[in-house]
Image (spheres, rainbow, N blue to C red):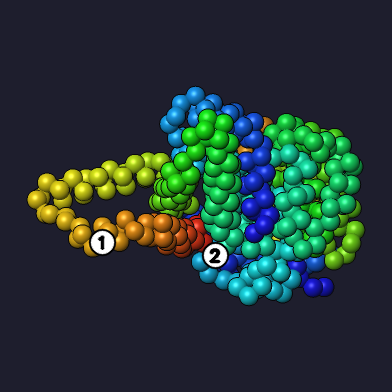
Amino acid sequence: MLGLIKKDLLMVKSNLKMICIIFAVYLFMTYNDNTNFAFLPSFISIVIMMSTFSYDEFNKTNAYTTTWPNGKSNTVKSKYITTIVIMLVSMIITILCSICISMIKNNLNMEELLSTSIGCIIAVSLIQAILYPFIFKFGVEKSRIALFAFSFLFVGVITLLSKSGIAFDIPESILSLLDNYWMIIFPLSAIILTSISYKISEIVYLKKEF
Amino acid sequence: MKNAIEIRNLTKKYDSKFQLGEINLNIPSGTIIGLIGENGAGKTTLIKSILNILKIDKGSIKIFDKDYQKEERNIKEEIGVVLDDMFLPENLFVKDINSIMKHVYKHWDEEQYFNYLQEFDINKNKQIKALSKGMRKKLEIATALSHHPKLLILDEPTSGLDPIIRSEVLDIFLKFISDEDHTILLSTHITSDLEHIADKIIFIDHGQIILEDSRDEIMDNYGILKCSLEYFNEIDKEDIIAYKKNRYDYTLLVKDLDKIRKKYDQCILDKITLEDLMLLMIKGEKQC
C-alpha cells in the first residue's frame, strides 16, 4: 500500500508549482484582508486528490495496479489515507501561516483559527465521504453527473419535506449538547462517515472490472 | 516439464456480446508462447483473466500450481506485466517508478532497474509523458523485469515500435528466457515477431482456441498452395483447411506438406507465415 500512497504523493509533487502559487495567493489574500481564508487550502486538497484520480483514469493506472501484489484491495485504502495526509498537512501549513500573519498584524485569534480549520477539515471529509464511492463506481467524469443527480435528489427531498409542513424541531437538549461538545461530536461524525464511505468504496471497487 | 500456467474450462462472458468459452490451456515453464488472433478475438480478455483483472465466470486458473483464491499476493510477486496502454500516470518521472515499486514488490531490484534504464538509454530525470512511444515501451519492460519475475505477460509489447527498437525488445525477451525457469506469454498482432522467438503459437478466434501448436510444427506442416481457377476443382476437399479465391487463382491453406507436394506437383507450394495462416483461417472459406 505504501507504493500506492507514494504514487499519489509523487503525482501531487509534480503539481507542486501550482500548489505553491495557490498558497501564495491564499497568503496574499489573508494578509491584505482580515477575512480568514483558512477554508481554501482544505478544499484545494480535494481538488488535488481529484487530479490524482483523473491521472489514474487517463493512464488506466487502476487496471495496471490491479496486477500488483494486493494492488486492488489497497487502492481504495491508499486514496483515503493520502487524502487525510494531504488534508492534515495543508491544515497545519494553513494554521502556521495564519499564525505568522496574525502575529505580524497583531490580531491573533487562536480559537477562531482552530475552529475554522477543524470545521473545514470536517466539511472536506464530508465531501470526500460522499464523492469517493461515486468516483470508484463511475470514474471521475461520470461521477460528477452522478453526484449532481444525487445532490438534486437530496435537495428535492428536503424541499418536499419542508413544503409538506412537517416540523423539524430539534430539542433544546441536543442543541446544547452540540454547542458544548461540537469539538468531539463533529470530528467523530466525520470519522464515522468516512469509515462508512470507505467500506462502500471498497465493496464497489473489489467488484469492478477493467 | 512444469506448467507456468494451467487453465481449465475457463469461461468469461464480457460485454454481453463476447464470451471466452471453455478454454483449456497448459503453458509450460521455460517457453515463449505467442497469442495471436484478430482484434476482439479474446486475447486481452484471456490475459486479463490470467492476471485476475477480470473475474472469470467458470473454470480455474493456476499460476505455478498456485491458486489466486489462496495465494494472489505470491502469484503476483512472480509476474511481470506489460499491458497495452496501461501504465503509471504520465506526469510521474522515470526515477519515481523506483521509489514506488520498491514498496510494491518484495524483490524489487533498484540496481537492476537503473541498469536497464542505462541499457535502454532512458533518462531517469524525464517525465514519462516526455518519452517517445518506443522509450515508454522499453520503460514498461524495464519496470516489468526489475522485480525478477518468473513469468512475463505481455499484451502488444511491440505495437507501434520501429523495427530497430522492436528487434532490441525481442532481444530482451530472448535474454529473459535464457533462464529455463522463465516463461513469456506474449500477445501481438505483429506475427513476424513470433516467427522469430515463439516456441508455441495459440490462435484465438471468437473467444475459442482454434489452433495450438509449436511454432516449428506450424511452420513445417502448414503451407500455401496456389492453383489455377480450373485446377481448383480437382483438389480433394479433405486436403483444404481454408481457401481464398483471387482474380486469377486460388490460395489454399494446406497441411502435411510432403503429401501435398507429391499429390499436386503442378501447383506452387509456398512456406507459410503466421500472417497467412491468420488471414486464411479467419477470412478464408472453410467449405468447398
Is residue B38 among what the camera can see?
no
Residue A110 lies, with reference to residue B80, above or below; the image says above
Give the x, y percent position of residue A138: 44, 48
**Residue assigned mark 1:** A174
Residue B204 lies, with reference to residue A95, above or below; the image says below
Q: Residue at x 45, y 46 (%)?
A: A111
Q: Residue at x 10, y 50 (%)?
A: A164
Q: Secondary structure at mark 1?
A: helix
Answer left or right for A137 relative to B26: left
Q: How many marks?
A: 2
Q: Residue at x 12, y 46 (%)?
A: A163
Give the x, y percent position of residue B78: 75, 64
Looking at this rendering, what residue extends furthest in the front direction?
A106
Compare residues B225 and B25 and report the one nearer the observer. Answer: B25
Quadrant showing the N terminus of chain B: bottom right
Give the x, y percent position of residue B176: 86, 55
Q: Secondary structure at mark 2?
A: loop
Q: Quadrant of residue B67?
A: bottom right
Answer left or right for A15 relative to A205: right
Gap between marks 2 and 1, in whole Å?
A: 52 Å
Answer left or right for B90 relative to B3: left
**Residue assigned mark 2:** B56
